[in-house]
Image (cartoon, rainbow, N blue to C red):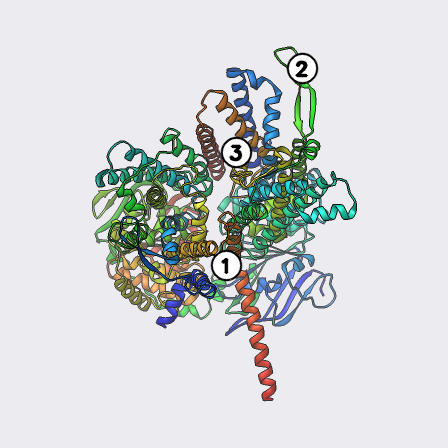
Amino acid sequence: MANPKNNAPVRRREPITDTQLLMTITICIFVCMYVLALLIWGGGFKKPQMIFDILNDNAFLIIVSCGLTIVMITGSIDISVGGVTALVAMVGVMILNGNLSLYNGLITALGLSESWRIVFALITALLIGLAFGTVQGFLIAHLQIQPFIITLAGMFFARGMITIVSVDPQKATQNLMDILQKRIEIPWLGSVNKRGVLIPAKMEIGVVVALVIVVLVFFLLRKTKLGRSFYAVGGNQQSALMLGVNVRRSRFMAHLISGLLSGIAGFVFMMHTGAGNATNATAAEMNAIASSIIGGTLLTGGVGNVVGTFFGVLTLNTIKSIVTTSGLRDPWWQSITTGAMLCFFILLQSVVLMRKNRKNGKK
Amino acid sequence: MKQKRFLANYSQLLIPLIAILLLVIFNLFRDPGFFSVGLSTNNNGDPVLQGNLISILNGASELVILSMGMTLVTAASGGQDISVGALAAIAGSVFVKVLKGGDITILTVLGAFLACCAVAMAFGAFNGSLVSFFKIQPMIATLILFTCGRSIAYWINGGATPTVASPILNALGSFIPGIPVPTPILIVILMGILFSLLFRFTTLGLYIQTVGINQSAARLNGINSVGIKLLSFILLGACCSVAGMIGVSRLGLINHETLLINIEMDAILAVAIGGNSLGGGKFKMLGSVLGAYAIQALTITLYAMKVPSTDVKAYKAVVIVLLVVMGSPVVKEWASRIWKKLTSKQEISVRKEAA
Amino acid sequence: MQDDIVMTMRGICKYFPGVKALDHVDFTLRRGTIHALMGENGAGKSTLIKVLTGVYPMDKGEIRIDGVDGPVVIHSPQEAQSFGISTVYQEITLCPNLTVAENMFIGRSQSRGVNWKAMEKRAGELLENLSIPARPKQQLGSCSLAVQQMVAIARAVDTECKVLILDEPTSSLDDKEVEMLFRLMRDLKARGVGIIFVTHFLEQVYAVSDQITVLRNGELVGEYLVKELPQVQLVEKMIGKDIEDLAVIKKNDPAADTHKEIFYAAKGLSSTESRPFDFHIAKGEVNGFTGLLGSGRSESVRAIFGADPVTGGSVQVNGKSTKIAKPLDAMKQGIGYLPEDRKRDGIIADLSVRDNIILALQVIRGMGHPISRAKAEAFADEYIKALNIKTASADTPIKSLSGGNQQKVIVARWLLTHPQYLILDEPTRGIDVGTKTEIQKLVLKLSEEEMSITFISSEIEEMLRTCSRLIVMRDRNTVGELTGEELTQERVMHTIAGGKD
């Protein structure tokens, strides 16, 4: 029945989707940038530890950005993530310190050892993240309130709660931090110092957590029905509804996952710093948005990838290292270059997508 | 008929008005003297007004001015500018930089203001051109300045936080000798008058709404929508410079890190609480202004209740969520459905009784 | 139930407050046929479709489907789909950012995972089977509109579909794309799918359908075989008695137009969307561009108004050369343009009727010269009365008006600018017959007042009634100009179809 004559001539080259295109650009630029830095300054950039340092410092940011990428793919936004991270870190530290009587009581009642505090801190972190995710998701998906306002309120609430929980900065007890701050040593990526001693590359546990989450979220977005429904909802909400996608559930789940990941990020943050402070993770939400954008996620929704986001975090922080290495030591240069970098990526994406769409429009 | 029209026109002001009213009632219950305004003399022997009401009106000045500009940007572009705080810091830095050089006279202050206004408008134009020419979402476009704006402000003054002291700046930031009303309030009134003149004698309001609602139709009716969006960002830039100037004058110094910190969030909130859609289109600037005062009233109320300033955010968040949930169309629909059910039940029971 | 019947609707009634939308309508669909559902706007076509797909519950009547015993009740589009009834709507309801394969399968599987390989393989087979020129891995947004439409159909067909409803699928496609779609429709027909084809285009009905059911004012006029119903009769059946009312409209004596002063003339005018063409219009003349949708008629008038970026050509207004590069230039020369797509390009949905009426005049006056509130109210009241616009008040947002009244507001917007030349692109699309007549009468009245008017309509009858000169377009080129005696339906059709005599 099919009429083979009518088949359009098949082009060999596989078509590339917007998501793949933007992600490829980011990875290419990151690689170019790093190679350039290697050629010009060599030194620190030659050591793999440079990358590991960036990862160690930003493991929490990677996790937060993964959540934000999901939310942005559905065409929504979550700016509570930084606040939740900070709140979780504060509460976590207080649990470790034994400053919360509820937990102290629990531990003595059950006759558990001090190390159990870590488990309690983790559970609490997940619960706080879930609570934020659930409430925000419900208000946004079911009551259809603008996500910006709701998550802004979420940020205010989380930041306010930090000081309500504790006015004074907290520092976790050393013996528990020793467990948390164990580093994984990778000898074959190490480097030899001036005295000829091999110093192995060191990676924190948080980085492993972050990498696992990147992989999990990648599979969620690529291989599950829920993940694909995020893209559908972000592409065109009305169409998604007509195609039989449960739009409300998708939007709710996106915010729920984002909240949960903020909780995990808070715990990772605490593992890294061991400090509870009102100014923890300041502007993390904006750094996460910037990372996602650099990684090729569009705020308009429907386009984005978590691998791109991962490279977005790396790019953003490599730039900062480059700025310090290049001798621009005045404090303002880091964020001015970051801004310029962001501007460059935003313009690049806008131009690339405009050109691509124009080409398609002309059939 | 006339009444109905009035209601339809101003119904969006209901939410901020209710918020303010609730706060007023709450405060009067808590402390009947909360709103009493007293006349006292300050250090210079000039009469000045004092009281919670004055500190609400005075403290909200920068927020009100920024929310005016934010309303225009929101309406025209359907997005928000998150760089207003950073832009105000840049404007403040320029203001101080110009004044730092020599004697501070009325003329140099005016010159400094013009300079910072020009710089802020230029940055506004930068944001605006990203949005209008390159069709980038406003929040993303302004994320750039949000990220690096305060550093630029720091850079302008070469890494210092210089102070400027002068009776003229004092007059700008607190009181003009002989006038008991704080000057920032007067500046807000002046800005209000300027904007209402702008709307009265130009068609800006109609154009902005048209562009915000239907860009394609706006173009076919001869409206330059790129220009209108750009203009709205430039006007917001001007608002930022005024807010920055007030902020600097209050303290007599520029601190790039803390000047009007987080105010962008409050300004966007003010627009939303004022009943304006964050998706653009129709707007009422008066709504945003009332929204801004409602936010400030809430803050002052919390302060008066001895809530530490760091904790205020959490309580504010709860009130905001309550407000937007009340205003959400879904909730309104639920409410009206329940109301209908209740009334129809009553009707049925009345009918049964009649039978 | 007879063997070849897949679906019957009997005595369907649907009432809305104060309106009988459907009054005892019957509809029968046979296996392997394309059945056109015809009627003017408001005839009840879309209501009937919505009853069938479960969007509206019906008030009376019964629906029977092949393979199901007894009458069925359909509560939702999902339920309709489970009975084998699929719908493809005018606006494409797919996600442009997903791949073709995903768009065909998303929201259908029960499992939690996505098996890309299997999905893409299945999609590839389906696309090849239906000769749809798209690849499974391609992003949907990179396909042309027609292909997107076909992907939507492929999705619908794949769900064990017995009844396929195509609701105005061709309105945004050009000729070639329509032909592609028709091929697909014939292919499906040969596979035994019953297709309900809703459209406004008479030509297309005759090109592809087997049967026609005509509705008018919510009532069934009848069911006919296409072979046995000539086009003129079909139009009569659709329009019914109203044809007499329309016949009252008499256009100006075309002979009188010949020695009139030329108002606007263009040579080699082209835009990014239109090929170069020559055009002129005299004062008081009513002319029209005709041709099928996508023939370039709208693009031509848009070029005149500067709605798309102008790329070349010279323009004279009132004998003086001028440049019209953007809409404002045209407006300043006294040209007005009522766009084809009212929702997208015409109305400012949230603004009041009053603001919508004064908009164009306001723009011409400039930013620094606002129209005072009192004057605006006077203008609005004047035109609401003059054009008989049905609105609660001048303060009502335009979006709450009916389509016909919205269109009148846009007409009022341009009349208020007192244009010398008014371009009306499909002013009668999607509005009720009464308003259509009013607008046609208005056109003739305005031309008597020395206004030049260019009129475009998909309905040739309408053009013949109002225009004294018709420019015929095909494939984005001017292929003929008809005046005087040549203005007959047959002749116009002939020229459009390309039968050069």
Task: Name the amino acid, label 2.
Answer: Leu
Image point (65%, 42%), residue name:
A92
- The subunit letter for the residue under badge 3 reads A
Mark 2, secondary structure of its residue: strand
Q: Which mark is residue A294?
A: 3
Q: Residue furthest right?
A: A111
Asked if badges 3 and 1 are on one and the same chain, I answer no
Q: Nearer the viewer, mark 3 or mark 2?
A: 2
Pick whichever of labels 3 and 2 is earlier in the sequence. Answer: 2
Q: Position of residue B102 (x, y in %)?
A: 25, 32
Mark 1, secondary structure of its residue: helix
Q: Position of residue C33 (x, y in %)?
A: 63, 56
In the foreground, C94 or A223: A223
Q: Position of residue C103 (x, y in %)?
A: 61, 45
Location of mark 2 (residue): A198
Q: Nearer the viewer, mark 1 or mark 2?
A: 2
Side of A96 relative to C235 (left or right): right
Q: Is residue B327 visible?
A: yes
Side of B152 relative to C183 (left or right): left
Location of mark 1 (residue): B323
Task: Name the amino acid, label 1.
Answer: Leu
Task: Using the rendered view, name the quadrant where residue C375 is placed.
Answer: bottom left
Task: Name the amino acid, label 3.
Answer: Ile
Q: Is residue C307 visible?
A: no
Q: Position of residue C122 (x, y in %)?
A: 69, 41
